[in-house]
Image (tube, rainbow, N blue to C red):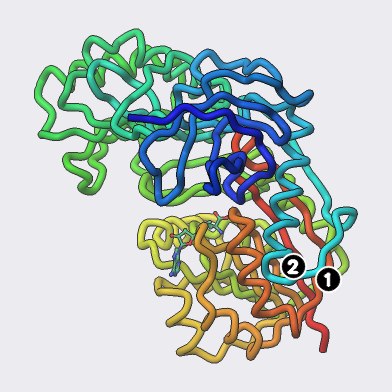
Amino acid sequence: MGKYLNLKIIDYYFNGLGISESENKNYYVPFSLKNEFIYAKTINRHKGFRIAIPIEIKKSSEWRKDSPCEYYLACGACNFMHIDYNHQLEIKKYILLKSFEKYNINIKESEINLVTDKPLNYRNSAVLANKNNKLGYHSLFTKNNVVNIKNCIVLVPILNNVLKILQDKKSEINSKFTSIRIKSCGNSISLIFELTKRPSLFEFNFFNNLLSQINSKKVSLFYCVERTEPILYAGNYWFKFKFKNINYTVHPNSFLQRNFYIYSKIINYLKNYFKDKKFKHCLDLYSGCGMLGLSLIDYFEKLTCIENNIYSVLSAKETVKNNRIFSVNIIFEDVATCINNYDFNSDIIILNPPRSGAYIETLKRIKKIKPEYVIYLSCNAVSLAWNLSFVIDRYKIEDITIFDMFPQTSHIETLVILKNKK
Ligand SMILES: C[S@@+](CC[C@H](N)C(=O)[O-])C[C@H]1O[C@@H](n2cnc3c(N)ncnc32)[C@H](O)[C@@H]1O
């Protein structure tokens, strides 16, 4: 049984939830804004947090706006859509500063640059869950519930078109389907159907009809049973697209950035930043399918990529081979183990770890390699600040920019350019 409370939002937590205090306890309130008065109901603790869900906004912030999405609050994909877009960016800046403060890193608000692109229709991939005749995204705190989504306004139009066709054919998407992974770049589309059992004639007919309705020549359709390797049903096994003059060949299971509009701006920003530079050796750590290092290849005599996902490694190798780029070495290994075991002599390092950040040992090793520059691209403000606290004695923050990769959500993508103090 939940408790009903009147709460005043006094601050933001690092994940974007509003913080409130009542009876000497902290409550974390989704979909709220600072200084709002909210009548809320507590739910079961979520990951150790006392969560209170707003029932009524008694006094609302000047930054609150009506969400343009009909599924907002029910769907768990976006959590900032009730906030004026410019104010979303202010909150992200505030959370970034607060994370830096937590680890005693001195940065002034005026030093943080902001780069934005499309606030909607930017996302080039999604996982649609299928449950109880509903096809869409999981709800926020009750992950077992699926919200039926007919149109997602943060998805790129080509994927919304796919979503619409899937919804029209929903009666054929039976309980054998657990989820559908959809991905696009340009007019290339990849669809992966996750099934509980091998498909029968019924599902094959469904696939054929679906393919005839999707108006793109570049569709790849896969299915997999119980999370095994995707089996190609139609189209190309490799997902192919062009980005910044390189023709990429990517495995269906490989990681890809979710917002190519802003990713393109990150690359342009770096190209401009290093425009008069040429480096001898770049080490691209957590390289995925190599897109960061390869987009900047003209700035390096040699590039070494390190990645522990075999599908991403195969993708990077395939791309390098097809584009006849000979100055690249791709290593399939854990980053920490690899940089400990080899003597790299790199004058620039790219660091783009997963949300949890890089290991401390990796950061210590980077300091021993002593590159002139470290380019750190992070998708989590707290792990970024924590990681920086281990290198800040030797490296100066030359540039810090939030690139709004995930508008309408509290996720913060930050690019930090570090220069060796020498
Ligand atoms: C945020 S993605 C970066 C991908 C790439 N830099 C890009 O721009 O597309 C993080 C990557 O780190 C890889 N990864 C995670 N832990 C790793 C580890 N311990 N060693 C090597 N790679 C790892 C993941 O597979 C993923 O491809």
Mark 1 element type: loop
Q: Position of residue 35 (x, y in %)?
A: 73, 33
Q: Given the image, on which type of amino acid does mark 1 rest?
A: Lys
**Marking on residue 299:** 2
Name the residue carrying label 1: 277
Q: Position of residue 3 (x, y in %)?
A: 42, 30
Looking at the picture, tell me which residue is in the foreground, 299 or 87: 87
Q: Position of residue 10 (x, y in %)?
A: 69, 41
Q: Position of residue 148 (x, y in %)?
A: 37, 17
The quarter of the image holding the C terminus is bottom right
Residue 385 placement: quadrant: bottom right
The quarter of the image holding the N terminus is top left
Q: CA distance from mark 1 to mark 2?
A: 7 Å
Image position of 78 with respect to 95: above or below: above
Q: Given the image, on which type of amino acid does mark 2 rest?
A: Tyr
Identify the residue at horizontal 44%, vertical 57% (top origin). 318
Identify the residue at horizontal 48%, vertical 16% (top origin). 161
Mark 2 element type: helix
In the image, 359: left or right of 272? left
